[in-house]
Image: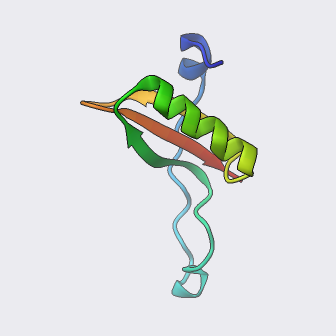
Amino acid sequence: MLTAASIASLTLAAPPAQASSSTAHSRITGWVIEDKYWTYDGCVSAGHQGVERGDWSRFQCRPGTLKWVLWVLRP
């Protein structure tokens, strides 16, 4: 379970720029926005499902303007 302290200790880094168009098919690595959810529970559920599938290694649900934003760390 993420706590306010653990969320505050994480930094969100922009993914590195792609070197050329030949790498367009590679997945973006680093912290990226995956989706937005109306409820915190929906966001957390989707985050856990992605970890279980191996789509990302960690996730955060951060409050947005109207919805909860699911940030994921792709390996």
| Up-down relation of residue 45 to residue 16 (above or below) | above
Position of the N terminus, as image quadrant, is top right
Q: Which one is nearer the viewer's eye here, 18 or 32?
A: 32
Q: Which one is nearer the viewer's eye here, 29 or 42?
A: 42
Give how far across and how far down residue 21 sits, in percent. Answer: 52, 85
On screen, residue 65 versus residue 15, left or right, reads left
In the image, farthest residue toward the bottom: 22
| Up-down relation of residue 1 to residue 16 (above or below) | above
| Up-down relation of residue 15 to residue 33 (above or below) | below
Please give the name of the residue rendered at 54% of the width and 83% of the height, measured from the top-left corner. 20
Q: How many labels does the image show?
A: 0
On screen, residue 23 versus residue 36, left or right, reads right
Please give the name of the residue rendered at 53% of the width and 44% of the height, measured from the top-left corner. 13
Please give the name of the residue rendered at 54% of the width and 56% of the height, measured from the top-left corner. 15
Q: Which one is nearer the viewer's eye here, 5 or 35?
A: 35
On screen, residue 24 versus residue 56, left or right, reads left
Please give the name of the residue rendered at 51% of the width and 66% of the height, measured from the top-left corner. 17
Give how far across and how far down residue 6 sits, in percent. Answer: 62, 17
Name the colouring of the figure. rainbow
Give how far across and how far down residue 26 sits, in percent. Answer: 63, 74
